[in-house]
Image: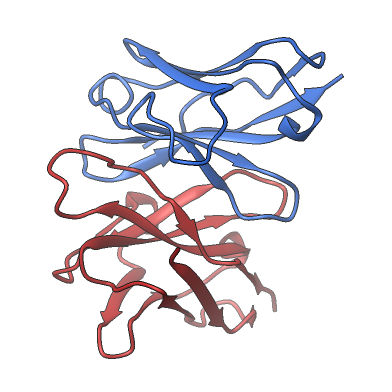
Chain colours: A blue, B red
Amino acid sequence: QSALTQPTSVSGSPGQSITISCTGTTSDVGGYNFVSWYQQHPGKAPKLIIYDVSDRPSGVSLRFSGSKSDNTASLTISGLQAEDEADYYCSSYTTSSTYVFGTGTKVTVL
Amino acid sequence: QVQLQQWGEGLLRPSETLSLSCAVHGGSLSGFCWTWIRQPPGKGLEWIGEINPGGTATYSPSLKTRGAISLDTSENQFSLTLTSVTAADTAIYYCARGRSYYDFWKGYGKIDSWGQGTLVTVSA
């Protein structure tokens, strides 16, 4: 199974909104509403920020939101803050009952 | 809040077997799926596999038959073994808690607790 496709990098100024895409196939992203998003700061373990396409775990900022259309999922960060600078990964359940991660996106706050 | 503490050998020679364990503190193994994920230095995340409370494991096709995940309910921990390692297996390995097993058709891929990570280097 191939990794889901994400842009290598996305940047924005403080206060702006940015969107990260995550493109898969009908065998993963398009087949289920089981897309998750993770934030990873350097040297740290990833942190879950979105699951089941658009659900937020308790304690995660409302500035993070998720959506999906066909084979592409998206993560939007609103009101960008310096602390949002990190790597972001999507993941999806697959028709093989396995999981696949995205290629990762580096978010830079200008 | 459940906490995961992992340990294992950090330096291996090619063809040796990788063995990592992960203890679950503040919660029970029952009711959840338990996952291993790795990340080569400077690269992205790779899902290795998961095991459900009944002991049935699913693995990434990329591992072929080299990987095995097991539960030790008496010690409240789970483990990963990976045979015949090569330099391509060099990575930070994370143990993690996956979905609630008894939530029907919800939270697949919801990995909400992670271990601290173990760097495993394979080098001759």
Residue A92 visible in the snapshot = yes
Does B22 sit left or right of B30 as displayed? Answer: right
- Position of residue A78 measured from the top left corner of the image (x, y, whole percent): 63, 15
Q: Is residue B103 left or right of residue B29?
A: left
The x, y position of residue A4, in whole percent, is 46, 28
Q: Is residue B44 depicted above or below B54 in this figure?
A: above
Classify residue A107 by image quadrant: top right
Q: Identify which residue, A100 or B27, lies in the foreground.
A: B27
Residue closer to the observer: B85 or A24: A24
In the displayed structure, A45 sits above or below A59; it is below
| Picture coordinates of residue A75, whole percent (x, y) | 52, 20
- Compared across the picture, whether B79 is left or right of A59 comes to left
In this picture, residue A55 sits left or right of residue A82? left
- Can you say whether A28 is above or below B17 in the image? above
Residue B47 location in percent, x, y?
A: 43, 51
- Residue at figure coordinates x 68%, y 55% from the top left: A44
Indicate the quadrant containing the N terminus of chain A: top left, top right, bottom left or bottom right. Answer: top left
Q: Nearer the viewer, residue B74 or A14?
A: A14
Residue B51 visible in the snapshot: no
Residue drawn at point x = 28 percent, y = 72 percent: B29
Quarter occupied by residue A11:
top right
The residue positioned farthest toward the bottom in the image shown:
B74
Report the label total: 0
Q: Quadrant of the image for the C terminus of chain A?
A: top right
Q: Residue at x 40, y 39 (%)?
A: A100
